Image: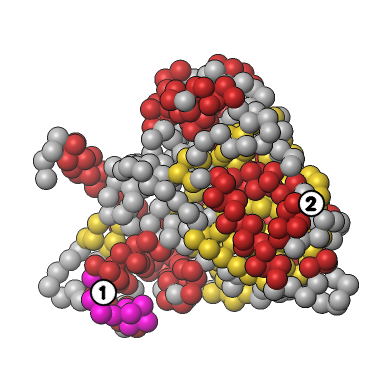
């Protein structure tokens, strides 16, 4: 990096933390700040953010990040990424009118039921590429319609969280297609708001913010923001995108021949698409479609308890052992874990089962089983479950698979990655990138201001900063293929009636 090279600011509004990172044009981190995301829990199942509290926290983080930079005047572009299903109502002056319902808040279940009854799953899927879940933005807007109609009547726009921060930075209201994809109200094919749907449910079509592609220049930072943070007034704000999709951009997963495995507390498989898929069975299985920040489309599926299952095991069964000890014990166990099999549905089942009443299970227990057998079985179960997510995606793939790229905290477990390569029977490219979402946002800012001439150039330049490690299948792949086909793929169906019966009994107060 030379003294003349531009710098780019990526802001990440996450579930757990708010982050601001400044990168050079090769993707290296120049400055980093982070703080917990202030989240309020007024009652069971409810959670919200106070928009101005979030904004003030972001201002503080920007100021601290800029203070780490020798040349603040070199910051040329800014973009924000965020969780995908939370938003802010603002009035005509830009003032937030109410709290922002958190993406995982469950109060909107009646509104999801209303959409299913009055619009129907098939009609919504045909336009949006999504099944109807309470988390999506339209359900939150309908909750406000039903509970605070006076507030909704005064609103000028609904802004997703990244859009709200961009608005506070530059005063321009806009949203990108990837965040709009998480509302239920975007028509994927025409890349426009579904005005007919909005009118049918009593929402003004002008309420959602104007649509722009990711990486579109919006305007310069406001003078008062520049004074408060140290940013140069010449810095330009751009549209960003949904955090998972920005991370895919940073990792170079932009072609239909690639798959991203994002391994965190939950785990997601992300695959770019060249066009929207029409089979409603995808939605019924829990897969979601949307618009990629690089252009084109994507399909996404995964499991809710990947890293969460590992953490649960450590807390419940690990005793005083640390992760290293548990992994070493599991390494001494042969593949198949002496007949123990683990079903990782600790937070219900997502794709391809889409069953909220599913529960986790250990099977094959005997008195010979020790902790190492259980932990290896848990790792094998996580990998087997992701194979069940991957196989339908491969059947849909429009080009031969070239790369499976993996990132996230789970990739640091070398035993898990070897088991996964064996279970998939495919090479996995592990990329050590901790802040992919913020980097993806910064890359979009760079495209908006001309630091990069194209998506392809941005991906090529940044790739050099993050070398990868290849994990190849071993001789155990054949055994794991038999274990999956003869045992694992049958477990969910066998346990489903039992789990649903337990759910009914528990709802009656039994147990």
Q: Please state if 345 lies on the left or on the right of 286 as rendered.
A: left
Q: Position of residue 461 (x, y in %)?
A: 78, 68
Q: Nearer the viewer, residue 230 or 409?
A: 230
Camera sees residue 253: no
Q: Please state if 502 lies on the left or on the right of 80 as rendered.
A: left
Q: Position of residue 151 (x, y in %)?
A: 53, 26
Q: Position of residue 434 (x, y in %)?
A: 58, 69
Q: Position of residue 211 (x, y in %)?
A: 71, 35
Where on the picture, by quarter, is residue 126? top right
Q: Which scheme is used to colour this image of the protein? A: secondary structure
Q: Nearer the viewer, residue 251 or 54?
A: 54
- Is residue 359 placed above or below 324 in the rendered structure? above
Q: Please state if 219 lies on the left or on the right of 111 as rendered.
A: right
Q: Which residue is mark 1?
A: 318
Q: Check the picture and name the quadrant holding the N terminus.
A: bottom right
Q: Residue at x 46, y 68 (%)?
A: 410
Q: Nearer the viewer, mark 2 or mark 1?
A: 2
Q: How many marks?
A: 2
Q: Nearer the viewer, residue 481 or 1?
A: 1
CB within 8 Å, label 2 to label 1: no
- Is residue 382 placed above or below 273 in the rendered structure? below
Label number found at residue 223: 2
Name which of mark 2 and mark 1 comes first in the sequence.
Answer: 2
Q: Is residue 1 covered in magenta?
A: no
> What whole-number distance in Å separates the C-alpha atoms at marks 2 and 1?
54 Å
Graded by Cα atoms within 10 Å as few (under 14), some (14 to 19) or many (20 or more), the crowding at tag 1 reads some
Q: Residue at x 24, y 47 (%)?
A: 495
Q: Residue at x 69, y 43 (%)?
A: 167
Instruction: Please give the range of residues in magenta.
Output: 317-326
């Amino acid at each position: 990096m030379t003294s003349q090279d531009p710098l780019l600011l990526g802001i990440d509004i996450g579930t757990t933390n708010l982050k601001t990172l400044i990168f050079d044009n090769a993707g290296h981190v120049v400055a980093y700040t982070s703080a917990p995301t202030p989240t309020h829990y007024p009652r069971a199942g409810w959670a919200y953010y106070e928009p101005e509290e979030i904004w003030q926290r972001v201002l503080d983080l920007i100021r601290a990040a800029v203070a780490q930079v020798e040349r603040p005047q070199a910051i040329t572009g800014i973009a924000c990424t965020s969780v995908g299903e939370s938003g802010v109502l603002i009035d005509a002056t830009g003032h937030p009118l109410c709290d922002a319902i958190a993406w995982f808040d469950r109060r909107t279940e009646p509104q999801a039921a209303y959409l299913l009854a009055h619009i129907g799953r098939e009609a919504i899927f045909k336009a949006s590429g999504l099944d109807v879940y309470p988390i999506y933005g339209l359900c939150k807007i309908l909750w406000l319609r039903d509970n605070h109609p006076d507030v909704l009547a005064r609103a000028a726009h609904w802004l997703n969280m990244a859009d709200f921060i961009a608005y506070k930075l530059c005063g321009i209201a806009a949203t990108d297609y990837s965040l709009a994809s998480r509302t239920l109200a975007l028509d994927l094919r025409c890349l426009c708001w579904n005005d007919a749907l909005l009118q049918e449910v009593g929402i003004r079509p002008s309420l959602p913010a104007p649509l722009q592609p990711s990486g579109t220049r919006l305007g310069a930072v406001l003078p008062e923001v520049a004074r408060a943070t140290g940013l140069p007034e010449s810095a330009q704000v751009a549209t960003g995108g949904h955090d998972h999709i920005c991370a895919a951009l940073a990792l170079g997963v932009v072609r239909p021949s690639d798959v991203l495995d994002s391994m965190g507390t939950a785990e997601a498989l992300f695959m770019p698409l060249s066009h929207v898929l029409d089979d409603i069975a995808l939605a019924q299985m829990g897969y979601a479609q949307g618009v990629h920040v690089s252009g084109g489309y994507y399909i996404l599926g995964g499991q809710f308890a990947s890293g969460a299952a590992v953490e649960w095991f450590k807390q419940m069964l690990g005793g005083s052992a640390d992760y290293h000890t548990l992994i070493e014990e599991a390494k001494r166990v042969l593949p198949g874990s002496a007949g123990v099999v683990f079903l990782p549905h600790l937070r219900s089942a997502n794709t391809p089962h889409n069953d909220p009443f599913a529960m986790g299970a250990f099977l094959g227990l005997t008195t010979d089983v020790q902790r190492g057998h259980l932990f290896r079985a848990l790792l094998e179960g996580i990998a087997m479950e992701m194979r069940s997510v991957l196989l339908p995606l491969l059947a849909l793939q429009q080009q031969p698979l070239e790369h499976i790229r993996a990132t996230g905290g789970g990739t640091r477990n070398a035993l898990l990655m070897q088991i996964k390569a064996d279970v998939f029977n495919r090479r996995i490219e592990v990329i050590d990138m901790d802040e992919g979402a913020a980097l993806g946002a910064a890359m979009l800012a760079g495209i908006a201001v001309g630091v990069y001439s194209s998506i392809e150039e941005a991906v090529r330049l940044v790739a050099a900063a993050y070398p990868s490690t290849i994990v190849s299948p071993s001789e155990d792949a054949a055994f794991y293929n038999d274990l999956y086909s003869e045992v694992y793929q049958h477990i969910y169906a066998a346990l489903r009636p039992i789990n649903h019966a337990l759910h009914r009994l528990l709802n009656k107060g039994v147990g």
